[in-house]
């Protein structure tokens, strides 16, 4: 059965969240600073995460939310263990 290759952005987010730091929230701009190898703009990273949301949850057990408000905030949280 064919399996989709790992996505570099999802891999980087998975490495960002650890057992000791299972949650992260801030703006897309701040997320880019945490993932310097990605070389993406804030609006692009948000669009990519909106598209890859279900894959992020299924493959890595990470819940993603994009909250609108005074500042748009991205919420990332490990909710289940990664499936192998």
Image (tube, rainbow, N blue to C red):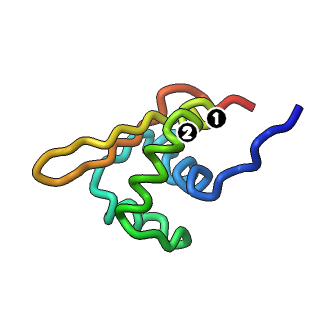
| Residue 60 picture location, percent across and down | 60, 37
Q: Are marks 1 and 2 in contact (CB under 8 Å)?
A: yes
Q: What's the distance in space between the residues labelled 1 and 2, CA to CA?
A: 6 Å
Helix, strand or loop status at disc 1: helix
| Identity of the residue furthest to the right in this view | 1
Residue pictured at 35% horizontal, 38% vertical:
65
| Residue 16 picture location, percent across and down | 50, 53
Left or right: 71 in relation to 41: left
Q: Nearer the viewer, residue 68 or 34?
A: 68
Quarter containing the N terminus: top right
Residue pictured at 28% horizontal, 57% vertical:
27
* Badge 2 density bin: few <14, some 14–19, many ≥20, Cα 10 Å: many
| Identity of the residue furthest to the left in this view | 70
| Residue 68 picture location, percent across and down | 20, 44
Left or right: 36 in relation to 6: left
Helix, strand or loop status at disc 2: helix
| Residue 24 picture location, percent across and down | 36, 46
Per the image, the residue denoted by label 2 is: 56
Q: Nearer the viewer, residue 33 or 20?
A: 33
Per the image, the residue denoted by label 1 is: 59
Left or right: 68 in relation to 15: left
């Amino acid at each position: 059965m064919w399996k989709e290759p790992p996505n570099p952005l999802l891999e980087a987010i998975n490495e960002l969240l650890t057992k000791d730091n299972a949650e992260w929230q801030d703006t897309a701009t701040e997320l880019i600073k945490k993932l310097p190898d990605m070389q993406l703009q804030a609006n692009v990273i948000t669009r990519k995460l909106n598209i890859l949301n279900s894959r992020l949850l299924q493959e890595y057990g990470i819940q993603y939310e994009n909250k609108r408000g005074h500042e748009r905030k991205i919420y990332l949280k490990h909710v289940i263990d990664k499936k192998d």
